[in-house]
Amino acid sequence: MTVNEPASTLDTDIMEVNMGPQHPSTHGVLRLKLKIDGETVVGCEPIIGYLHRGTEKLCESLSYPMVEPITDRLDYVCAMSENLGYMGAVEKLCGISVPERADFVRVIMVELNRIASHLLWLGTHALDIGAMTVFLYCFREREMILDLFEEFCGARLTYNAFRIGGLLEDLPPGWTGRCRQFLKVYPACQKEYEDLLTKNRIWLKRTKGIGVISGEEAVEIGLTGPSLRGSGVGYDVRKAHPYSVYKRFEFDVPTGENGDTYDRYLVRMEEMRQSLRIIEQALDTLPEGPIRAKVPNWLKPLKGEVYHSVESPRGEQGFYIVSDGTDKPYRMRFRGPSFANLQALPQLCVGHLVADVVALIGTLDIVLGDVDR
Amino acid sequence: MNEETKGGAPPAGGEGEKPAPRPAPRARTGGLSEEELTKEVPSRVVERLKSSFPDAIEEVTYFAGNPIVVVKTDRLIEVMSFLKNDADLYMRQLADLCGADYPDRPQRFELIYQPNSIRHGHRITLKIRIAEGEEAPSLTGVWKSANWFEREAYDMLGIRFKGHPNLTRILLSDDWVGHPLRKEYPTEGRPEDHMLLRDPGFRPPDIMTGDLPFKP
Amino acid sequence: MDTELLLKVAVSAGKVMTVLLVLSGSVAYLVLLERKVIAFMQSRLGPRRVGPSGLLQPIADGLKLFLKEDLVPAKADKWVFTLAPVVVIIPAFAAFAVVPFSGESFDVFGLTITPWITDINIGVLYILGISSLGVFGIIMAGWASNSKYPLLGSLRSAAQLISYEVPLGLSIIGVLMIAGTASMVGIVEAQRETGWWFFVPQFVGLFIFFVSGMAETNRAPFDLPEAETELVAGFHTEYSGMKFSFFFLAEYANMILVGCVATTLFMGGWMRPFPSVEALAWLNFLDFVHPFWSGFFWFAAKLFLVIFAFLWIRATFPRYRYDQLMHLGWKVLLPLSIVNVLVTAVVMLLMNSGSSA
């Protein structure tokens, strides 16, 4: 790190700058209160809540199936993961087991969504650091995934694709072929991004050694997902607490070494390849059969409470449901990975330059819908 | 739909391969029965807790394969430090912390913790119960990640944490009145009927003059 | 005597007007070119709605900027705030006075009109001096806005412009030494005499000039003063309407200026490739209209090449960080340019002593 030079003997004033809530690179309505000495950040306080919609309260007056569209709107970049997590929590609460085919389709969708989400992250992250072409390349490929989603469930962002106990509808005819087509073209596209960034000297200068956090500290502060794995901790909910049918697929959990922005970048790039692997295996072994377990429309779980978490592209997305035996959840809690990850930002920022703050917001990959809920 | 719920007819059918005995009539899930869901599962964490803190544990229940341990409020930090630092358990991460409101109970609030061991891959749900006006012990000294979670619990439920460095609202604005996740918080009607939304006496700090309070 | 003077003044004024008009037009179309070229590199289409394939887009943009409300922030220093864009744009255009756009003069009504506004013997110094005045405008803009982001942007900008002025100036010295003159026209003529363009012996100089030029014009990857994702829009965050468009025009005019200077100093100005090889004379194919147009064609072609490289780099690279930028300027480019000057001097000394001995 070249920036942590001791303060000069000049008498300098500390300036307070408001970054956001309307700022091009805070990815939504995040507001940062920055204390800067020249260009060096000496303090950072995230102020959140501008997108708070009271979903947890709202869920208390909705029946279980009615909550699902709300989960879409938490982390709108990876709505499939949110859907899967909520479905998993309710199914755990009721003890429903899902037909195999439905589980496979769910995994395919979630992994496609993971790629789409990482593409959005990569594009905006690169744009924040100044590489604007990558952004448009990423959106070109994301478009292909969104087309696949649109064909499957009719929506492109808030999918509401799954149902408690399975799926609403089976895959449309010919969908698997088109999905395979995407799998075929995608690796070459990813190579394009890597050509532009991975060995680019300016990119290396901007990301190496920026926002270093050790594995121990990262766990302590509650980082999950790629941000944690960049520090070398191989914690992936898909492996640690397998849900759905992830046990059946072979995939690696990539980890970084230095815990800096560059390693987190590499981890996410590798994760996209692993997602491709999972989708390929799932398509190869996609079983035939029913797509939905018999679940009453008016669901009334037993009295009890469950915590269920899934690995969303941003980290551990947890759902805590307290049921009092009625058709509506008594207490619904969404544990957003972005919320916990954002907590690490002040620690990462201090000592870096203003330009790095932007890179660090990007590397934590926050979605404000998930932070504020 | 309606007659189904009223009639309490047996669910449309369980899983084909598991002809479970029909559950209590209240549950309408089509899934596992109550006995199966609340079955006790072996858990190292619970065993260790029971042997190390026999007097701190109030209650252990199980649901869907997950142990739920209620501990005494004043022993919380001790238990949590043990969970975090014990080499055998090593639950280094606090995955989640949230509160729940039960207005009918004498101890109105429940705080629910989800410690998580990355090395050993086990987790439990830990709870404490506190009454209104009572202060919960803050876990910020044990886990840094508890900071924002506790602020959120304060914001949403009005639970105060003893020893928290900066217990202010986090999601709602500073002039908000009331705590939305409490059960008595109104969800219908016009805001002016409840006189809840804004405190007219509140003055936000003047941003232009730059005297922003700064508490990270 | 008096009529002669008057005529001279009229001709000069006419040339100034022509250059100003053509320059404003080319700046406007440079914006379109940039959008089209970058769109092509990013697999999109770029502007297409206004006119055939977007050709009237610059006019629409200009109209929009003219008609927009001109806002002055309440707490801004009004005079300085208004003066700043003027201070930025005047040097940007004034520097074109010494650029030779072509080689051949042409006669109108018995008057010989040279294809440059003036040819002074310190042309290169004049350009360096004038173009560095623009930084005052940027500092004024940042200061007068009375806002934090513009202030940060203008501080960055001032530091950057001053730092890169040094290697920029040093990178040219090699050329001046070989050419033996500081007149822009003289340098092009010198390239005809030596038989090769100066980028061959001075490729290090060209590289340094190009990089510093990018930094001087705040182009990516050195666009820190207006780094959109960090400082919103840098020093012109608070500007709108015409005042904003002045900054905009000045930036692109500076870009063209750097292209012109690079073309003149390193790439043979208006000359066709291999000017001493008679077999390639057909390259001046516009001679049948007037030799002026041949020179202008080659000048424009080389200018386009330089500007295309600018755009290409913008589409490819991420942005430098402030400290890295300073590092590059002072610790890499400056020593390199000094070494370049020394090596040039030594080589010239050896060659001269060899020829005289």
Image (tube, rainbow, N blue to C red):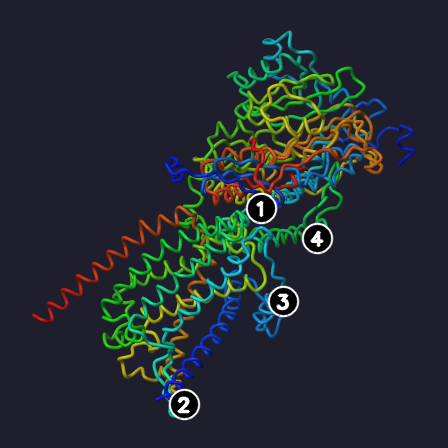
Near-viewer residue (A351 or C148): C148
The x and y percentages for residue C174 are: 25, 64
The residue tagged 1 is A115
- Could you tell me the amino acid type at mark 2? Val
Looking at the image, residue A252 sits to the left or right of residue A325; the answer is left
- Could you tell me the amino acid type at mark 1? Ile
The residue tagged 2 is C108
Instruction: Look at the numbered disc 1 and give the secondary structure of its residue.
Output: helix
The image's mark for residue A173 is 4
Instruction: Look at the numbered disc 4 and give the secondary structure of its residue.
Output: loop
Frontmost of labels 1 and 2 is 2
Residue extending farthest top: B55
- Badge 4: how crowded within 10 Å, few (<14), some, or many (20+)? few
Residue A24 in view (yes/no): yes
The x and y percentages for residue C317 are: 45, 54
Q: Quadrant of residue B91?
A: top right
> Mark 1 and mark 3: span between their CA atoms?
44 Å
Residue extending farthest left: C357
Which image quarter is the C terminus of chain C in?
A: bottom left
Marks 3 and 4: same chain?
Answer: no
- Could you tell me the amino acid type at mark 3? Leu
Q: Residue at x 64, y 23 (%)?
A: B113
Instruction: Look at the numbered disc 3 and give the secondary structure of its residue.
Output: helix
- Badge 2: how crowded within 10 Å, few (<14), some, or many (20+)? few
Marks 1 and 2: same chain?
Answer: no
Chain under callout 1: A
The residue tagged 3 is C67
Judge whether C129 appears above or below B67 on screen. Answer: below
Q: Residue at x 29, y 79 (%)?
A: C275
Q: Quadrant of residue B96?
A: top right
> Mark 1 and mark 4: span between their CA atoms?
23 Å
Mark 4 and mark 2 residues within 8 Å of each other at the beta carbon:
no
